[in-house]
């Protein structure tokens, strides 16, 4: 299972159109994803003060687009919790097929940062 943080409006649009493409797919060539243990660090560094987020739980085995495990794209933007340059993140090189999404869970920030919601077990 890999994870992707998305706004509620972007996810609603994806469900309406049957296709999800994050802005980073056009600007960087891939959709940023994370392993479960990376989600909070990513959220705390890039999504502070957002109340409109969902956490997509994605089954890797159902992906149609290519998935690559690569170094972080923006390690210098890590301000809250450090993202190590030697870490590997899942990057999806193409649109996310909606049938690979096992769940879309409300993802909220508390006073001291984001809180990981209960996620479905790995398949």
Image: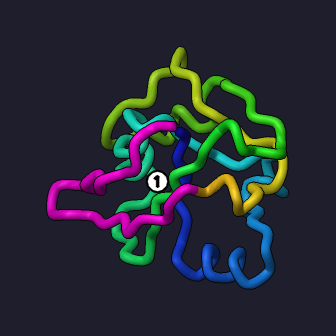
Q: Is residue 33 left or right of residue 103?
A: right
Residue 10, above or below 85: below
Residue 84 location (% of width, % of height):
46, 22
Residue 66 location (% of width, % of height):
82, 36
Residue 62 location (% of width, % of height):
72, 44
Query: Residue 8 lies in magenta, yes or no?
Result: no
Q: Nearer the viewer, residue 64 or 26?
A: 64
| Residue drawn 36% across the image and 76% down it | 51
State the colouring used for the structure image: rainbow
| Residue drawn 63% across the image and 34% down it | 90
In the image, which residues are magenta?
Answer: 102-123
Query: Residue 103 lies in magenta, yes or no?
Result: yes
Residue 58, above or below 53: above
Residue 5 location (% of width, % of height):
51, 58
Q: Nearer the viewer, residue 43 or 3?
A: 3
Per the image, label 1 sits on a secondary structure element best described as helix
Residue named by callout 1 = 46
| Residue drawn 52% across the image and 20% down it | 87
Q: Is residue 28 left or right of residue 84?
A: right
């Amino acid at each position: 299972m890999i994870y992707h943080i998305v706004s509620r409006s972007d996810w609603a649009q994806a469900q309406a159109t049957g296709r999800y493409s994050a802005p980073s797919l056009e600007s960087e060539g891939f959709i940023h994803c994370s392993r479960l243990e990376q989600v909070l660090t990513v959220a705390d560094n890039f999504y502070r003060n957002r109340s409109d987020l969902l956490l997509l739980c994605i089954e890797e085995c159902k992906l149609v687009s290519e998935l690559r495990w690569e170094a972080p794209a923006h390690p210098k933007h890590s301000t809250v919790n450090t993202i190590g340059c030697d870490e590997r993140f899942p990057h999806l090189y193409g649109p996310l097929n909606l049938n690979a999404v096992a769940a879309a869970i409300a993802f909220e920030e508390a006073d001291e940062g984001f809180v990981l919601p209960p996620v479905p077990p790995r398949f």
